[in-house]
Amino acid sequence: MRANLSVLRAMLALLVALMLPSAFAAVPNNRAQPAYAEEQTMLQVEADTQRGAPGLTSSQSGHVHMDRHYLGQYGDSEGNVIVQRGGNTWRHLRNGPMASIAGTLLIVVPLLIVLFYNTVGPAREEPRSGRKLQRFSRWDMQVHWATAISFIALAISGLVLTFGKKIMLPWMGHDAYSWVAYILKYVHNFIGPLFVLCSVVMFFTFLRRNFLQRVDWQWVKEGGGLVSHKHPPAGYFNAGEKAWFWLGVTVLGLVMSITGLVLNFVNFGQTRYVLQVANYLHIIGATFYIIAAMGHIYIGTWGTPGAYEAMRHGTVDEAWAKAHHSLWYEQAKQGIAPGGAPPPTPPSAAPNSPPSSPPPSPRPGPAH
């Protein structure tokens, strides 16, 4: 076991050493120096003036330059903006620190998941009973997979557009990479609104089953049994799944949806400043969303044997349900819908019986 752990650590260090330069380099111009002599001159003139133009933190961070270097209309009020100080700062942050941090996290997190799997191992698997229990409906599965597939398409295309110039272009060549980037750009732009729609439908589909309950705190205190390999009591969804729903699907989904639509549809008068802020939030949100999705995918597959079967076929083994979602298992056996109220009292029960006494047994009806 120690030998395997040492080998894994060595592989982790080697991969990080190989990939970090690409992550920090990200894309060209990471030093964010002005691209043209004219821009350098104008920025120097501006720096020499007593009153500097508004910077990145101001929505009015545009430098008006009325001469033959006219850019053309871009937004309702920026047709005469030739140099924007915030643009140089945005380029520096996006291509430098933000790309470096995002690239590092997206490399390290999956390696940590592999390390966790090899050291701690998956959840304890219970012997199968052979009896199936319905967990998800066909509609649940369709909504889930539509959202998941659109998310994966956006993640892959977004990563290629962000890091492709540095990682892929050198070995693919300009011609091949230009076609890949061109296609993935339109994939990203067209799949984005579909992902927004799927996220909204998914929210309302699973909302009733994700309300927090007191028992969820017990699951949190025990860490979901990921290390101890115990099975804390849980309802239809445990606290970890609810955290993914509220922080991932809902909060990060809103961040990605709003900023993505702002960047995708630029014909509503957005200024450069608005687009730059939206781009910052989009990169940050995408990084955390992809990282959270990695954890979600791990726990739903290798980390919890039998969990993938639920979203693949809609059913789980009764022994699995009893072990991982014991409270939901008891409700399901009683016919109580997830997030719903207990079934009504049978008509044969005495209506005025005290709560502590069991209902009388139904009398046998006349023979037919």
Image (spheres, grey):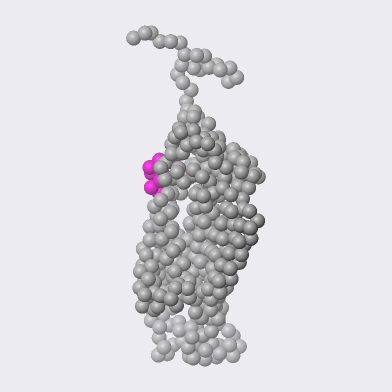
Question: Does residue 146 appear to the left or right of 112 in the view shown?
Answer: left
x 49%, y 43%: residue: 306
Which residue is at the front of the view, 42 or 7?
7
Residue occupying the far left of the picture: 368
Quarter of the image where one finds residue 221: top right
Q: Is residue 218 above or below residue 3?
A: above
Residue occupying the far front of the picture: 3
Which residue is at the front of the view, 361 or 79?
361
Q: Main secondary structure of the magenta part?
A: helix
The percent position of residue 355, horizontal first and vertical second, equals: 58, 20
Q: Is residue 140 covered in magenta?
A: yes
Q: Is residue 215 above or below residue 122?
A: above
Question: For the magenta stretch, what is the residue range?
Answer: 136-143
Q: Is residue 315 visible?
A: yes
Callout count: 0
Question: Does residue 24 appear to the left or right of 186 in the view shown?
Answer: right
Q: Quadrant of the C terminus?
A: top left
Question: Does residue 306 appear to the left or right of 153 in the view shown?
Answer: right
x 38%, y 61%: residue: 191
Quarter of the image where one finds residue 67: bottom left
Q: Is residue 119 above or below residue 365?
A: below
The percent position of residue 132, horizontal first and vertical second, equals: 44, 34
The percent position of residue 181, horizontal first and vertical second, equals: 39, 71
Q: Is residue 250 visible?
A: no
Which residue is at the front of the view, 178 or 266?
178
x 57%, y 45%: residue: 123
Q: Is residue 163 covered in magenta?
A: no
Q: Is residue 231 above or below residue 64?
A: above
The percent position of residue 15, horizontal first and vertical second, equals: 56, 67
Which residue is at the front of the view, 315 or 2?
2
x 47%, y 29%: residue: 335
